[in-house]
Image (cartoon, grey):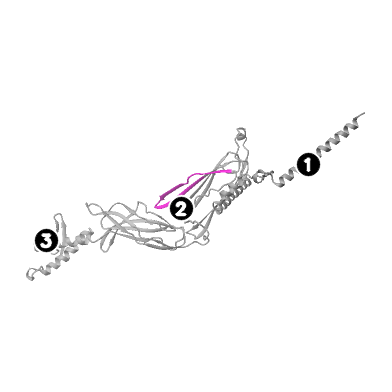
Amino acid sequence: MKKLGAIQRVAERTSRALHRLLPVGRRLTKPTAQAVCGDGGLGVSDTSGWKLPLRVARLSALVALVAASSTLHSAEPFVRTTLSTKGDIWVGQRVTVLVELLSPGFFSGTPVFDVPRVPGVILFKPDERPVLNTETVAGVSYAVQRHELAAFPQRPGQVTIPPFKVRFATREGAASPVEQRLTSEAVVFDAKPPPGTEGLSTLISARDLEAKESWQPEPGAAKVGEAFTRTITFAAPNVPAMLFPSLPAATVAGLGIYQKEPEVRDRTERGEQRGERIERITYICERPGQVRLPAMKLKWWDLDDRQLRTIEFPARVFDISPNPALASLGLEGPEPRDDAKMLRATIGFSVGVLLLAFVGWWMWSRGSDWWQCIVAFWRPIHLAPLNPTGTGGRPHALARATAQTFAGNHRSIQSDQSQTITRTNAGNKP
């Protein structure tokens, strides 16, 4: 109907212009005309019942159609990008960027958004359920698809979401769809750090954040081999499940800790998105004694009250006693680690590595001499002969003197022995 009204207005202006061009004797006294669209097509008639000449009516109708067609085809699809979140924007808060697609015709298919990667910002693509509407721009009616791009700044400062490509298809009437490749506009905003959050690595800024903890069974008195399951659930509106922090897998002596893959759920409740993350951890008692599981804290920024809130999960104590059933079967928990032995082994290994490194450096600094030094170390040492020979095979003077001395001493010893034997025999005679 809006297109028909535009054609009607163009036809009226055209008929008035043609009326002024007619000769004076053939002019109509009441040049008020209007476009009429009936079953037989488009015609022109004046409101007073006077009929325009046939040629003038046909010509005015043709000009009206051409003008109306030109007006409609001059409108092109375009993309409009605006920042929907108003007021102060905090680190970790959801920032909504509206991406509106406007087309003078109908949409065909699902649009595709080439969302860029922005340092310090987590961006989520719009979902496939846009809000549909119509809008008139400069006298032209457009079909509108409104999509929401979610941005979560992770650090303070100015954030710029650069232009990105948007692809979608449009069609007019029974014509084939036409693919459109357009570019969005850049969006700039400032993210503020909430007071007291300067030292936090991650932060969630939300409304009505919930955190629940449950145990099955409750920690307390236990026996070796018994298991306890801990379940922690995070939930908040307008916060994707993947943004909730994961629980740290701390190591506790005396407890075996087994953490399952978290469950992440994103759903829409009454037009509002809600994220939920469920963590499950199983603790198994490994040896007797008292074991303390440390407490955990989560800090988040309340957007409604503008306060930094803390969620604390209290510490738990396990009083573990021996399990007679396991002892009778010969199943005992693993022996505790000897940290002193591990430290000594680590130090010994480090010293050995340093010694090998020193030997390698020494061999490299000696160059080719190191091999000769090793050969010389293992080469046997030959002592000097006791009776070295001189030239011609005759003994040296020192050798001859030594031999003579040894011979004289031998003869003297033999003489003393003979005299001693003679005296002994003489004394034994009767």
Q: Position of residue 324 (x, y in %)?
A: 62, 35
Judging depth in this view, the residue of 164 and 304 nearest the camera is 164
Secondary structure category for the residue under label 2: helix
Judging depth in this view, the residue of 236 and 256 nearest the camera is 256
Secondary structure category for the residue under label 1: helix
- Graded by Cα atoms within 10 Å as few (under 14), some (14 to 19) or many (20 or more), the crowding at tag 3 reads some
* Circle nearer the N terminus (3, 1): 3
Above or below, comparing residue 209 to residue 215 in the picture: below
Q: Is residue 211 among what the camera can see?
A: yes
Identify which amino acid the numbered label 2 is placed on. Leu
Q: Is residue 315 among what the camera can see?
A: no
The residue singled out by tag 2 in the image is: 243
- Graded by Cα atoms within 10 Å as few (under 14), some (14 to 19) or many (20 or more), the crowding at tag 2 reads some
Identify which amino acid the numbered label 1 is placed on. Gly
The mark total stands at: 3
Judging depth in this view, the residue of 86 and 285 nearest the camera is 285
Residue 58: which disc? 3
Identify which amino acid the numbered label 3 is placed on. Arg
The residue singled out by tag 1 in the image is: 408
For the point 40% across and 58% down, which residue is it?
96
* Circle nearer the N terminus (1, 2): 2
For the point 87% across and 33% down, which residue is it?
422
Foreground label between 2 and 3: 2
Q: Position of residue 167 (x, y in %)?
A: 31, 55
Magenta region, residue range = 255-280
Foreground label between 1 and 2: 1
Mark 3–mark 1 distance (CA, rounded to whole Å): 165 Å
Q: Position of residue 147 (x, y in %)?
A: 35, 55
Secondary structure category for the residue under label 3: helix
